[in-house]
Amino acid sequence: MSYTVKFSTRWADFDPNNHMRHSAYNDYAAEARVRFFNVNGFSLAKFHKENIGPVLFSENTNFYREINLSEDITVELFIKGLSENGQRFKFQHKIFKQNGVLAAEIEIYGAWLDLSIRKLTVPPKEIITTFNTLDKSNDFEIIQINKK
């Protein structure tokens, strides 16, 4: 399934050049991920109950077209990578201008953190099931975990 969220941008998202500031793109990508998990039964309260949270290792943004002041956007979310046990994940976000032109792509790489012991952990099986509902990116990969 494709997961898409439409956003009305805010005045605070823009810089003095009247285009979206670079960090706002990443804020909208993060909001899309939170909403994806929420609509699939994993609210922030549920993550707290499960005693896990996501931790990011990297976040890479490529900009293609500027988003102008007051322009609405659409964020489309894909799963780009997943380890067999679901501990590690990669998401791809495509951010589109209101006319449908691709404005940016964001890739994040992360894992699940046990919030008590502050160590990486395997998530509940329901999260892996939730990951599997997303469309895979064209370059989807199985993430190999190095065992030390």
Image (cartoon, rainbow, N blue to C red):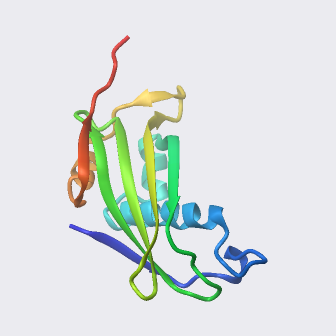
User: In the image, what residue occupies the spot 32% across and 25% down?
Assistant: 145
Position of 93 with respect to 140 (left or right) is right
User: In the image, what residue occupies the spot 41% across and 61% down?
Assistant: 93
User: In the image, what residue occupies the spot 62% across and 89% down?
Assistant: 70
Quadrant placement of the N terminus: bottom left
Quadrant placement of the C terminus: top left
Q: Position of residue 48 (x, y in %)?
A: 49, 48
Q: Position of residue 16 (x, y in %)?
A: 79, 77
Q: Classify 17 as above or below 43.
A: below
Nearer to the camera, 46 or 25: 25
Q: Classify 109 as above or below 32.
A: above
Position of 130 with respect to 116 (left or right) is left
Nearer to the camera, 81 or 36: 81
Res 41 → quadrant: bottom left
User: In the image, what residue occupies the spot 34% across and 39% down?
Assistant: 123
Nearer to the camera, 94 or 10: 94
